[in-house]
Image (cartoon, grey):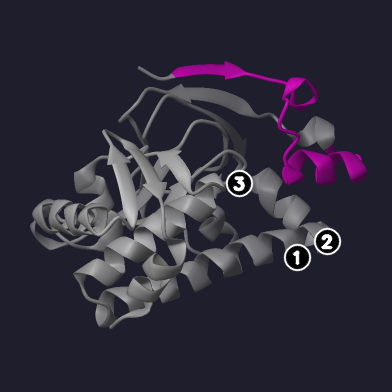
Amino acid sequence: MRIEKSVKCIDCPLKCDIYLTAREMGLEEMLEPVYIFYKKYESICRQGSKIKNATILIQGNAKMFVSGHCSRNIILNILIPSNYIGLTSVYGLPDYPYSVSALEDCHTCQIENEALEQIYLQNQHFMKLLNHAFGSSVAAIMNKLISLNQKQIRGRVAESLLYLSRLYDSNSFKLSITRRELGELSAISEENTVRALTELRNEEIIGIDGRNIVLKDTETLSRISMNC
């Protein structure tokens, strides 16, 4: 069950760009954020539903994904603290084009769209920040489309492992997603994901201990990720 409560931005440890810009403009009193807690696996937003608020992830990890035919999902991104959810409303798209669900207990802050749009339209610096965030997201999705269309199974899994390494800023990390979800990140079946991971481990390119992954040979893994 979600836990909702009103909060004051001044008390938030994150100090997101929305608050910092509103304070600079003297509009911080206009913000009336709502702090919402989501349990692990709980849905934060659903594909096709109306976007009512701008959501900032404060704590925890979540997955952003799209649902296709036969209940098959493709994970677009793993979201970490300070990532935004629902920015597309600023660009005239009223519905979520994706779903987001919590990979672990998540703390979020939600701000009404009207307040976000007012700040966006009145502050050029904030407009550039949001445009950059949106553009980076679109570029990442375009690269994923190329990968899914051109790369073989090993290349997709290698690319996903390198993506997670950059996300966690380490060659050694604990998977926040299951093997099935790693397959959804790579747009392949769970069986093919496990097979590819086993091959990479046997070749001593990666190390696996439960959900702990170590990228032992990132150079070789990068070459594999580039193979079509």
**Mark 1 nearby-residue class (10 Å; few <14, some 14–19, many ≥20):** few
Left or right of 139 in this view: 133: right
Find the magenta span and give its range.
Answer: 3-27
Spatial CA span between label 1 and label 3: 18 Å
Place residue 153 in its image quadrant.
bottom left
Expressed as whole percent of the image width and height from the top left, the position of residue 227 reads 31, 80
Q: Which residue is mark 1?
A: 128
Q: Is residue 135 above or below residue 83?
A: below
Task: Report if residue 47 is visible in the image.
Answer: no
Q: Amino acid at mark 1?
A: Lys
Left or right of 167 in this view: 62: left
Q: Amino acid at mark 2?
A: His
Q: Earlier in the sequence, mark 3 or mark 2?
A: 3
Q: Which residue is mark 3?
A: 113
Instruction: State the residue at coordinates (48%, 63%).
Output: 93
Foreground of the two, 142 or 214: 214
Name the element at disc 1: helix
**Mark 2 nearby-residue class (10 Å; few <14, some 14–19, many ≥20):** few
Instruction: State the residue at coordinates (37%, 78%).
Output: 226
Residue 204 among magenta residues: no
> Which label lies toward us, 1 or 3?
1
Q: Is residue 141 above or below residue 133?
A: below
Instruction: State the residue at coordinates (26%, 33%).
Output: 210
Q: Earlier in the sequence, mark 1 or mark 3?
A: 3
Q: Amino acid at mark 3?
A: Asn
In the rendered view of the protein, which quadrant contains the N terminus? Answer: top left
Q: Which residue is mark 2?
A: 125
Residue 6 among magenta residues: yes
Left or right of 127 in this view: 205: left
